[in-house]
């Protein structure tokens, strides 16, 4: 079935905060580039086109266009966001101008901190509100699951993907499983990442170090070799 999304479409995520621009469409995934420049693989039913939205969607659309147009220009082409400080058009002494700029920077840092906190709270609420638990299909015992992150286990056409696209899909699924593990109070999840060049394993370990209230170890070598990591929650 032909996807209703095309490269260049502006879309919004349904189950989490954010959105971006469609950069590639496959039979299984729609790749969306967010404002950090990363391509995120999403299921088509997890998206909505900005053209189909009203009100807040239009505001997001205009902000995304401003961001994208700024990428091709220089720093002076991108307007500084307002921090609630009224800068007078009158010419200021150098010392006073520096002082005003420092105030603006401080206000911007406070705004960013508040937005990050709000984003984390919203994402946590969205995760808890999801009715399905993808770890059920990987459950091996009560409160335990085993997730195989090999790309051929996550998509029917792995040969259509570039190495980078495959890596993004694997990391997206890993993060989704971690969110569901927390939301559903799992005890243990084993992630089978394989050996390869070690890129996927290294990135998973890097992200696991950023979580609180978990412990992780190399999974038993007798069963998994050196290609798996087990994560304990709580």
Image: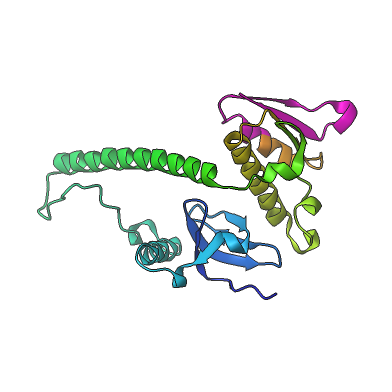
Please provide percent x and percent y for residue 95. 16, 39
> Does residue 192 appear in this view?
no
- Which residue appears at 67% of the width and 46% of the height? 134
- Please provide the residue range marked out in magenta: 205-234
Q: Is residue 28 left or right of residue 40?
A: right
Q: Is residue 126 left or right of residue 107?
A: right
Please provide percent x and percent y for residue 74. 40, 60
Residue 233 part of the magenta segment? yes
> Does residue 8 appear in this view?
yes
Q: Is residue 117 left or right of residue 5?
A: left
Residue 71 in which image quadrant: bottom left
- Which residue appears at 52% of the width and 45% of the height? 129
Please provide percent x and percent y for residue 19. 49, 58
Query: Where's the N terminus, which quadrant?
Result: bottom right
- Which residue appears at 42% of the width and 62% of the height? 64
Q: How many marks?
A: 0
Please provide percent x and percent y for residue 85. 19, 47
Could you say which is closer to the camera, residue 191 or residue 180?
180
């Amino acid at each position: 079935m032909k996807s209703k999304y095309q490269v260049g479409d502006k879309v919004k995520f349904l189950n989490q905060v954010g959105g971006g621009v469609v950069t590639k469409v496959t039979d299984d995934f729609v790749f969306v580039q967010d404002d950090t420049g990363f391509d995120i693989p999403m299921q088509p039913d997890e998206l909505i086109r900005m053209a189909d939205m009203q009100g807040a969607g239009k505001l997001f659309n205009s902000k995304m266009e401003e961001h994208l147009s700024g990428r091709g220009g220089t720093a002076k082409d991108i307007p500084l966001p307002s921090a609630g400080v009224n800068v007078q058009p009158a010419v200021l002494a150098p010392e006073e101008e520096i002082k005003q700029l420092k105030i603006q920077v401080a206000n911007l840092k406070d705004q960013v901190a508040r937005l990050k906190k709000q984003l984390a709270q919203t994402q946590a609420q969205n995760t808890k509100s999801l009715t399905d638990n993808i770890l059920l299909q990987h459950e091996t015992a009560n409160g335990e699951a085993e997730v195989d992150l090999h790309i051929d286990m996550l998509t029917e056409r792995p040969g259509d993907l570039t190495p980078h696209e495959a890596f993004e899909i694997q990391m997206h699924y890993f993060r989704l499983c971690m969110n569901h593990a927390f939301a559903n109070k799992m005890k243990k999840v084993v992630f089978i990442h394989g050996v390869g060049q070690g890129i996927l394993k290294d990135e998973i370990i890097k992200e696991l170090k950023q979580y609180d209230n978990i412990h992780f170890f190399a999974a038993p070598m007798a069963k998994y070799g050196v290609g798996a990591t087990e994560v304990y929650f709580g």
